[in-house]
Image (cartoon, helix red, strand yellow):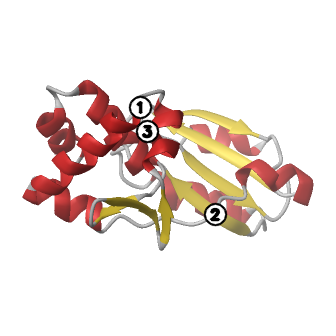
Amino acid sequence: MWEVVSERLKEYPERLTVARTIIENGLSIRDGKIYCNEIEIPPIRIARVTKLDRRTVTWAIKMIEDDEYLHKLFNHIRSAGHSLKDVAKHLNFGVVEITPIDAKTPGILAKASTLIAQKGISIRQAIVDDPELSPEPKLTFITEERMPPELIPEILKINGVGKVSIY
């Protein structure tokens, strides 16, 4: 997906920055406007985040809507919801962040969640970054309790796992 987006906007790097910001934040474009689910986001807000001119955001929206593939894609993006990662420590939850060697390696999510379950720890959330959209995709588990450090070497044995961090 990202390859197509970047190919179609490659001659306009600032518009590509706008597109990336919209995708990364789960925003959509409908009828010339930006939305977070049903909440309209003014273009000036995207301009401030990207440090670009509001007109650049407006032109990016127009370009996306004028392209049939991009229009369909950006029209149907929805926010994936809230993440407990930043508040986990305040809730006494655990956070396990797994950085894969190759995010397309199958089984990392299944095997890591099995190891966590075998320790008798409940998983509250599993958040997986899309490897096409994130330069360093991660698999993040928010768990009912803090993770025991001895779980790190076990997770590192999973095929395709490069790094494990526990918070």
Residue 57 drawn at (x, y percent): 34, 40
Residue at disc 1, secondary structure:
loop
Residue 90, numbered label: none
Q: What's the amino acid at mark 1? A: Pro
Q: How crowded is mark 2: few (under 14 residues within 10 Å), some or many (20 or more)?
A: few
Mark 1 or mark 3, which is nearer to you? Answer: 1
- Determine which quarter of the picture holds residue 13: top left
What residue did someone put label 3 on?
160
Q: Of helix, strand and loop, which one carries label 3?
A: loop
Q: Is residue 161 visible from the viewing direction of this image?
A: no
Q: Which of marks 1 and 3 is nearer the N terminus?
A: 1
**Quarter of the image holding residue 117?**
bottom right
Residue beneath the point at 31% across and 34% down: 56
Q: Earlier in the sequence, mark 2 or mark 3?
A: 2
Residues marked 2 and 3 touching at CB (< 8 Å): no
Q: Distance between the residues labelled 1 and 3?
A: 16 Å
Answer left or right for 18 relative to 47. left
- Asked which secondary structure carries label 2, the reply is loop
Q: What residue type is labelled 2?
A: His
Residue that numbered label 2 is attached to: 82
Q: Mark 1 points at which residue?
A: 135
- Above or below — where is 86 with respect to 6? below
Above or below: residue 51 compared with residue 70 = above
* 3D distance between C-alphas at marks 1 and 2: 21 Å
Bin the neighbour count of mark 3 within 10 Å (Cα to Cα): few under 14, some 14-19, many 20 and up.
some
Say which of 113 and 49 sits in front. 49
Q: Marks 2 and 3: which is nearer the front? A: 2
On the image, the x and y values in percent for residue 66 come to: 11, 54
Q: Earlier in the sequence, mark 1 or mark 2?
A: 2
- Tell me: 138 left or right of 96: left
Q: How many labels does the image show?
A: 3
Callouts 1 and 2 close, C-beta under 8 Å: no
